Each structure stands twice: as C-alpha cells, then as structure tokens.
Image (cartoon, rainbow, N blue to C red):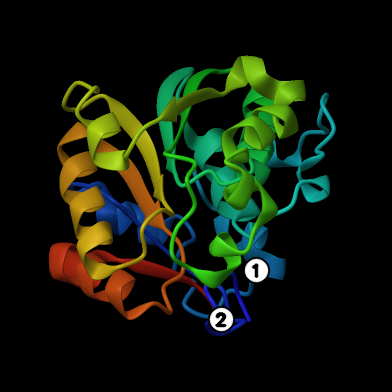
Amino acid sequence: TDKKGGSSSYRTWALQFGTAARQFAAAGIEVLNCSPASALSCFKKWPATEALENPSTMLHFYEKIPGWFHCEGLYRAAVASAGKRATFIEVGAWKGKSAAFIAVEIANSGKDIEFYAVDHWKGSDEAAHRDDPDVRAGTLFETFQRNIAPVSRYVCPMKMPSVEAAATFVDGSIDFVMLDGDHSYEGVRADIDAWLPKMKPKAVMAGDDWNWQGVQQAATETFGDRVQVLGE
C-alpha cells in the first residue's frame, strides 16, 4: 500500500496552463499508463530535456531519507524545462525526501531556481503520520532540516499552512507547484484555489495520490479534462 493506506499504484496528475496545455500533452505527457519506473521516458520530448542526459555533478542521496517519493521523472522534467530563473513550490515536504531530490537537480542544472518547501511539519491524522516518532516528539521539522542539510542552500522551508504560504507570493510569479499536502477534497481544493492565481501563464501544477477520491474530485472540478494523469 502507499503512504495513505490506499492502492500501491502511484498516480500523479499534472497540467500546464493556458494554450500551452495542449503543448504539455504533445511534449510527452500522453502517459496514462506510465509506470513510476519508466516515468523519465515519458518526458523525452519535453523542451530542454538535454539536462536529463548530462551526468550529475552532485550525487543524489534522497533514497537514504525516510518517506515516500516516486516523481523523479516529473521533477527532473520541471527543472530541465525551467528558464534560467524560476520559482518552484512543493506543498507537503514531510522529512525532505522529495525536497532533497529536486534540490540536487537544481544544483546540477546551474539555473537560478528558487525552491520553497511548504509544510506545517505537524503531520496529519493519517496513521503513518500519527504513529511516526518525529510527529509524536514534535521534531519533524528538525528532522527535515537535518535530512536536507547537504543541499540546504537550495531549499527555503516555509513552516506554515499552504494557503498562508500562497498569500505571500505575487500573482503570476510561480513556474511549478507540486501539491502533496492535505489530500481531502476540501484541502486539495483550498490549495488549488490559493496557488492558482500565483502561477505564470505557462506554469505547471501537479499533485500526488490520484487514487484519493478527494484529489480527483478537486482537480477535475477545477481543470476538467486538461489534467494529465501519470501512473499505472
């Protein structure tokens, strides 16, 4: 099972705004049956993917960090397709596994990408969170900081609720947002509504755990058939 106790099939959703929505699909994301193991191949036609083929100057260490992460292809493509300057947001950072991954990608890209990890670091009502020693001890944020220490210069933690964090950004200023926080319908809808005005015209918004009913409902109500589903 996955971290939410649901299906072991991980599915991520994503879309690009404006007229670029069709370009996003044409660039290699017609991937309704793309497994996590082959996710990178789904982005071969994404613009500026040459960075995906270059050897890294900093080695990845995210696999040593506890947590759940399977969106390597999506994150690599986001960094590779970004301009020389960009702003990325990750909502739901847990212990830093995914943040560590994208921070290494940013470091190796040589681009000026501001990356903000947004979380209140209190856990949630999900069993995997409630039973976690760091949640019980109130040390989740400290564990996150320790885990991302090698790449801390590339990560800006925002210790606050997602909607509050969104309010600190100027409209039309963000290139990429990953929503992986509250998975209830109300939580996902609130996150989408809060971050949507902050996105640039051709920005990409993505989310995790498509198998959750609340996630599907909130995303499809807002974006309809523009959502591209990645996963098995």
Instruction: Determine whether 163 is above or below 22 in the image.
Output: above
Camera-side residue: 192 or 27? 192
Residue at figure coordinates x 80%, y 38% from the top left = 60
Tag 2–tag 1 contact (CB < 8 Å): yes
Left or right: 144 in relation to 210? right
Residue at 82% x, 39% y: name it: 61
At label 1, counting other C-alpha atoms closer than 10 Å, the crowd grade (few under 14, some 14-19, many 20 or more) is: many
Residue at which label 2 appears: 232
Query: SS class of the residue under badge 1?
Result: helix
Q: Return the residue nearer the eye: 178 or 52.
A: 178
Name the quarter where the C terminus is drawn: bottom right
Question: Percent from the top left, x then y, of residue 210?
Answer: 41, 73
Q: Report the front residue among 100 and 158.
A: 158
Q: Position of residue 172 (x, y in %)?
A: 19, 27
- Label 2 CA crowd tier, 10 Å (few <14, some 14–19, many 20+): some
Q: According to the image, label 1 marks what residue?
A: 36
* Residue in the image at 58% along x and 74% along y: 34
Residue 35 is at least partly visible in this image: yes
Q: Secondary structure at mark 2?
A: loop
Q: Quadrant of the N terminus?
A: bottom right
Amino acid tagged 1? Pro
Q: Amino acid at mark 2?
A: Glu
Give the mark nearest the N terminus, 2 or 1: 1
Q: Quadrant of residue 109?
A: top right
Q: Residue lying at the far front in this picture: please name it.
A: 137
Residue 169 drawn above or below residue 119: above
Report x, y in % for residue 173.
Answer: 26, 24
